Amino acid sequence: MAQIESALVIPVPQAEALVGPLRERFEPSASLGAPAHITLLYPFIDPRQIDDRVLNILAACFRTFTPIEFSLSAIRRFPTGTLYLALDPDEPFRALTRAIWKLFPDTPPYSGQWPDIVPHLSIGQFADEGEVERVADELGRACKDALPASARATDVALIDNSTGRWTRRSTFRLGN
C-alpha cells in the first residue's frame, strides 16, 4: 500500500468538464479519487494525527481569508514534466499556503522540494517530453475557447488516502 498521507486542497469543480478526462489518464491522484484542485499544502500531517485541535486550528485560519475569484488562465508546464493550468491571480493561494505552513512548520509544501510556491491545477505528470507535448496540444485544442475560465474558491478540503483512495475528510469555508 502507498504511504498514508493528507493534503489541503481547493476543489475546482468548474474545471472537471474541461480537464477531468485528461487528469484521469495522466494525473495519478485523479485516478485515485482526487478531484480537479489547487493544492495548498501537500503532504500535510499524517491522517492518524489529525484530531479536533488540528481541525479547529485550520478552521480558524481559513475564516481569516475571503473567497477568491480567479481564472484558470493558461496551459503551462514545470521542468519536472508536470502539465498544469496556471491561476490568475495566484498570490491569494500563496498566502493561504504560507498561513497553513506557518501554523504547521513541520509540513513545508511538497516536503520542501522546491523553493517557490507555484499555485496551479495539475493536468498530468509525464516522463517523456514527446508525450507531454502531445497532451499539451490536446489540452490546447480542448481549451481553445474555454480559457481563461472563471472560478471561485470558497472552500478548502482536507483529503487523505487512508482508504487507498483520496477522499474528503473535512471541509472548511473561506471567510465567515
Image (cartoon, rainbow, N blue to C red):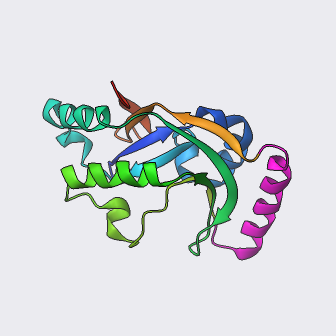
Res. 2 in view: no
Q: Is residue 2 above or below residue 129?
A: above
On the image, the x and y values in percent for residue 174 come to 38, 32
What residue sits 58% from the left and 43% below the top?
70
Task: Give 124 or 165, whichever is nearer the viewer.
Answer: 124
Quadrant of the image occupied by residue 120: bottom right
What residue sits 79% from the left and 43% below the top?
146
Task: Give 111 or 69, whichever is nearer the viewer.
Answer: 69
Quadrant of the image occupied by residue 8: top left
Q: Main secondary structure of the magenta part?
A: helix
Task: Give 50 or 114, whichever is nearer the viewer.
Answer: 114
Q: Is residue 79 above or below residue 5?
A: below
On the image, the x and y values in percent for residue 28 come to 56, 52
What residue sits 72% from the left and 47% below the top?
148
Quadrant assignment for the C terminus:
top left
Res. 9 in view: yes
Q: Is residue 144 above or below residue 52?
A: below
Magenta region: 126-146
Q: Is residue 59 above or below residue 115?
A: above
- Does 155 appear in magenta? no
In the displayed structure image, the side of residue 52 where residue 168 appears, left or right: right
On the image, the x and y values in percent for residue 61 come to 26, 38
